[in-house]
Structures are given as C-alpha cells and as structure tokens.
Image: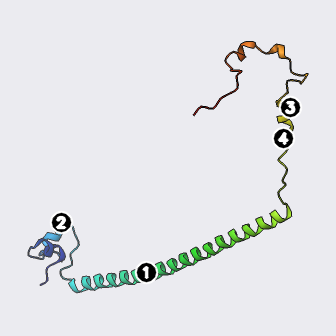
C-alpha cells in the first residue's frame, strides 16, 4: 500500500487505523489522508498544475499585449510632442511677423515717473530731510583703483 503524503514526508510507515479509513499519523495530526486515494490526489494535483500553466500563459499573453500598447502610446505621445513644438515655433514666427519689435526703449510707467521727483520739483519739501543722512556720503568723484 502507498503511504499517504503526510507519512511519506515524515518518513514513517503509513498504518491505517482499524476503525477508520485514515492512518494513525493523519488522525493524530488532524490532517487529510490521501493514502488510499493516491491516484485521485495525484490526478487533482496534475489538474491544478495544468490550470495554473494555462492561467500563466493567458497572463503572459495579456502582458505582451499591454506592453505593445504602452510602446504604441509612447510613440504617439512622442509624435504629438514633436508636432506641438513645431506648431508653437510656427505660431511664434507668425506672431513676430504680425507684431514686429519696436526699436524705441520701453516707456517708463507712470508710477516710476511719480516716484522719482527731481530736485527742481516744487512738490519735494527739502526741509523735511535730516542733514545727518548725508554725513556718510562722499561728495568727491569716485576713482578707479587697480
């Protein structure tokens, strides 16, 4: 008689109990017994292995398909990016043709003109300035030293 899987793994003799269909080791360890049903257990094992192989092949096919789609999307995105850069460049050329740059310097804003009064400006009250602010300033012309 073929030993059950449990007894085979443990290297023990498989002895079926008198009042049971299972061996004493399987009863004591509370595991399923497959000694007398060895052929059926082997068939179930082989069937499960076959199902797993089929599932693996199916998933491998899906993986290959998805990888192909990813490559396709990346190529299309690259083409679109290149086309977008080209369109932007053409748009800038058209914009510059329609709006040529002027050679005159940009005009000062009205705020900047108001913020810097000249000494001859009557709105500047020189009496409000503290003369001690001018003490640290050198009134001599700057010289370059080498």
**Can you tell which quarter of the image residue 113 is in?**
top right
| Discs 4, 3 touching: Cβ within 8 Å | no
Q: Nearer the viewer, mark 1 or mark 3?
A: 3
Q: Nearer the viewer, residue 30 or 10?
A: 10
How far apart are the alpha carbons under marks 4 and 2? Answer: 95 Å
The x, y position of residue 19, in whole percent, is 14, 74
How many marks do you count on the picture?
4
Question: Mark 4 or mark 3: which comes first in sequence?
Answer: 4
Q: What SS does tag 3 mark?
A: helix
The residue identified by callout 2 is 29
Question: Mark 2 or mark 3: which comes first in sequence?
Answer: 2
Looking at the image, residue 72 lies above or below residue 94:
below
The x, y position of residue 1, in whole percent, is 12, 84
**Can you tell which quarter of the image residue 100 is in?**
bottom right
Q: What SS does tag 1 mark?
A: helix
The residue identified by callout 1 is 60
Q: What SS does tag 4 mark?
A: loop
How far apart are the alpha carbons under marks 4 and 1? Answer: 68 Å
- Furthest-right residue in view? 122
Local packing at callout 3 (Cα closer than 10 Å; few below 14, some 14-19, many 20+) is few
- Mark seen at residue 114: 3
- Mark seen at residue 108: 4
Looking at the image, residue 140 lies above or below residue 50:
above
Q: Nearer the viewer, mark 4 or mark 2?
A: 4
Q: Nearer the viewer, residue 132 or 80?
A: 132
How far apart are the alpha carbons under marks 1 and 3? Answer: 74 Å
Q: Nearer the viewer, mark 2 or mark 3?
A: 3
């Amino acid at each position: 008689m073929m030993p059950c899987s449990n007894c085979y793994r443990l290297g023990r003799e498989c002895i079926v109990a008198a009042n049971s269909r299972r061996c004493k080791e399987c009863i004591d360890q509370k595991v399923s017994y497959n000694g007398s049903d060895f052929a059926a257990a082997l068939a179930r094992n082989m069937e499960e292995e076959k199902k797993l192989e089929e599932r693996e092949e199916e998933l491998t096919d899906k993986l290959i398909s998805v990888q192909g789609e990813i490559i396709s999307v990346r190529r299309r995105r690259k083409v679109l990016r290149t086309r977008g850069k080209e369109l932007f460049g053409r748009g800038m050329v058209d914009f510059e043709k329609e709006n040529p740059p002027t050679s005159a310097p940009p005009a000062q804003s009205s705020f900047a003109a108001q913020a810097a009064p000249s000494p001859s400006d009557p709105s500047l009250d020189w009496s409000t300035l503290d003369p001690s602010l001018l003490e640290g300033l050198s009134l001599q012309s700057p010289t370059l030293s080498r």
